[in-house]
Image (cartoon, coloured by chain):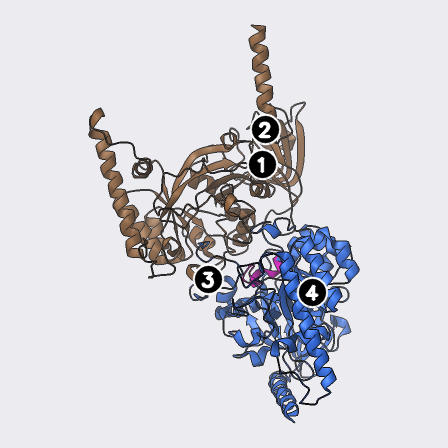
Chain colours: A blue, B brown
Amino acid sequence: MRSFTVTVLSAALGAMGMASIANAQETPLAFTGATIIPIVGETIERGTLVVQGGKIIAVGADDAVTIPPGAEAINAADKVIMPGLICTHSHVGGIGGADSSGPIQPDVRIYDSINVLDPGFRRVVAGGLTTVNTMPGSGHLLSGQTVYMKMRRGKTIEELAYRDDDGKPMGGIKMANGTNSIRDKPFPGTRGKSAALVRAKYIKAQEYRDKIRRAEGDPEKMPPRDIGLEALVEVLEGKRIVHHHTHRHDDIMTVLRLAEEFKFRVVLHHVSEGWKVAEEIAEAGVPCSIILVDSPGGKLEAVNLLYKTGSILEKAGVKVAFHTDDWITDSRLFFRMAALGVRAGMSREGALAALTLNGAEMLDLGDRIGSLEVGKDADFILLSGDPLSVYTKVLETWVEGVKVFDRSDPKDLLHAVGGYGAGSDQIPYMCCYDHGEASQ
Amino acid sequence: MNKVNTSRAFAAAVALIVSGPWLAGAEAQLAVRGRTVLTMSGPPLENGVIIINGGKITAVGPAATTPIPDGYRVLDAAVITPGLIDAHSVVGLTGIYNQKHDQDQLERSSPIQPELRAIDAYNAHEELVAWVRSFGVTTLHTGHAPGELISGQTFIVKTTGNTVGAAVVKETATVAATLSGAALKGGRRGSSAKGKSPGTRGKLVAMLRAEFIKAQEYRTKRENAEEDKKPARDLKLEALVRVLDKELPLMVTAQLAQDIANALRVAREFDIRIILDGGAEAYLLMDELTAANVPVIVHPAMTRAFGEMKNMSFETAARLRHAGILIASQSGYESYVPKTRVVLFEAAIAAANGLSFKEALATITIDAARILGIDQRVGSLEVGKDGDVALFDGDPFEYTTHCIGTIIEGQVVSDTPR
């Protein structure tokens, strides 16, 4: 009875969100004459994109698409249209996940700590991003549950979270190994201890899951409810993806080893030395979300971070996405990441997919977003030129057929370029950044 | 006679072998041809050539009318620029590992230490020096970092050399001061750690003024007293006297308008030269900066916009430049990842946000050289200047272009396409 009510409530909340979107976008919008990069399929030189009810209803060459009657036609000549960008790893929103009480905290939900009104989200849409995986940090072996967010204009996380078929907010779980999670007690002091703590916790989760199954609903036999173990059971059952921060090649191998033992679905994040073990990652069939920064170093395990990681992984057959790790890099400069990947040898198509569809798939959202295809969400961006050029600007960002960023609006321009009143005093989340040694 | 000559030649040969990682001979004779040569001293040259001999540029002109002497090594590139200048970095004092042993850019034992020299702290073999060199950076203004009221001195080096002595261009460039909140003890505005100064901005400026006054009195006593009555040498005050004498500028790191105003006030009081470093809110004080003739090394465009940087803008470089202020770009100081920025990338963002291509390139070439007082030697491709050249396979600011070669005084110091 109790679970039925929860399901109805979740569905109602979800439906409320969808209903308001449908009202906002009953008139079809047709963008014509643009260079369209659908990600799936060839670039369309002079193309038309039609959206309605929050969905893409047509995309193709100008002369191949029939614009529906009553549609508002928007001349997009000299512009480039792409799917909205997807960042699989972001810390925007004044977030605070697990605290310093212990290294493994699966009970903690980042959902409960996101300031949706944070100006950082204005910069996110200014960069052309329409979906982000907002995560706790990497200072823990397991820092909490993440949430996949749609960059709608809204005031609460309820309005922005992606929801599954049961209406529950969608997200993964954030884990990390290597140096960031090695700290003073009660945190592990070595890599060996780190892995041992993780294994012990997952074994507890297995036993919790088995107890629940054996109880067969009998309240006398059910174990006391543990919201942390519940989340780990979702991981064990493949419903919740592990987003695992890892840098050094041996730390990468440890993640693969644990994933093999406990059969959890995993996306590797950062993967600075992935280029050293590309074959092994490919063999494990595990996707990688990588970051390219201005120089190697800054910490020991990133000393061998190379721009060519994306190219080497791509050639080895590994699925690659990029992420901002905002605030480590600025969401407004997300395209730069793909361009640097191409600079170091990645294919152009692969680099653009790494900003869009590949990331979508790493969030189990590949059927909803990440490419301009009929039936997918109307999340798209208008650019002033080639996406890989430093001179190109994001002109407009649209989410579910609603414009959420317009560079020609002075309020939005302020966030796109910065200036007086653009920012906040808020100290950003960047794991291990010593605020006493300010870079100012 | 023969013995002496032989031993001298031997010594010279040994010096060559140990003096650097470069490949060419002592008398480097190099010609660099570019489809577009951006000399930064006149309009771009189409199909131009730069001739370098003995470390200096000996000819610049169209390839058709500028013959290359026999025996010269010839390099080709789509675009050629002067070797890039990073107007403010900490690379060489800061290292790639970011562990205690390779972080010498900030001494925390006392807030005013102008006597700390960069030459005593620079690691010529630091990997990050090679990293920035591979993007075309040939000259670094580097040294003690922002974070203490006066953290120490900066100096100017070429991004090559087996030892700092082989790399140095100017042994002391500036005395580095910080008037931003980063120099306050115990955290953000207004708070202070018990017993530690400066804890507030009022205290910060009072301490600075008191030290300059001490330096004035020291200078007077040293100048006027008889030999046996002179005060003992004081390295700290000596360094500040060089600032008072306008021999060295005070490079002041300040972001907020109020801190920039503080810097201008102190400069007026002591009649010293200052260079503004950072200037996130400098666009609020352009008239004042112009009137005081203060050049600005604009903060890296990709600095994270929080705290004192919250009101920063990608367009600040353009706004200052178009108000007539002399500006340069920098890679700045980072405490985490990335350990260093690359000044080429920072200038590119400025080029995409209001600065013209030429104006943006000037911030990492000739205008940076002017601010640092080294424009007689570097910053443009002109006869008589150092043979420092950067080679690119396209627009240097485009993300997908590569730097395909870096030349310092006629030696190829980097040829990995980056």
Dot 4, how many residues are within 10 Å of its Cα: few (below 14), some (14-19), or many (20+)?
many
Which of marks 2 and 3 precedes in the sequence? 2
Spatial separation of the CA atoms under disc 3 and disc 1: 36 Å
Q: Do the CB atoms of the residues marked 3 and 2 lie less than 8 Å apart?
A: no
Q: Do the CB atoms of the residues marked 2 and 1 lie less than 8 Å apart?
A: yes
Q: Single out the residue that lies furthest toward the front.
A: A220
Task: Name the subunit of mark 1.
Answer: B
Identify the residue position indicated by label 1 in the image.
Answer: B389
From the viewer's perspective, is the residue at label 4 or at label 2 nearer?
4
From the viewer's perspective, is the residue at label 3 or at label 2 nearer?
3
Amino acid on which disc 1 is placed: Val
Please name whichever residue, B176 or A107, is drawn nearer the observer in this view of the structure: A107
Instruction: Mark 2 vs mark 1: tell me if same chain.
Output: yes
- Tell me which segment is drawn in magenta: A326-336
Identify the residue position indicated by label 3 in the image.
Answer: B306
- Is-magenta flag for residue A329? yes
From the viewer's perspective, is the residue at label 3 or at label 4 nearer?
4
Identify the residue position indicated by label 4 in the image.
Answer: A267
Identify the residue position indicated by label 2 in the image.
Answer: B52
Task: Name the subunit of mark 4.
Answer: A
Position of B54 relative to A151 (above/below)? above
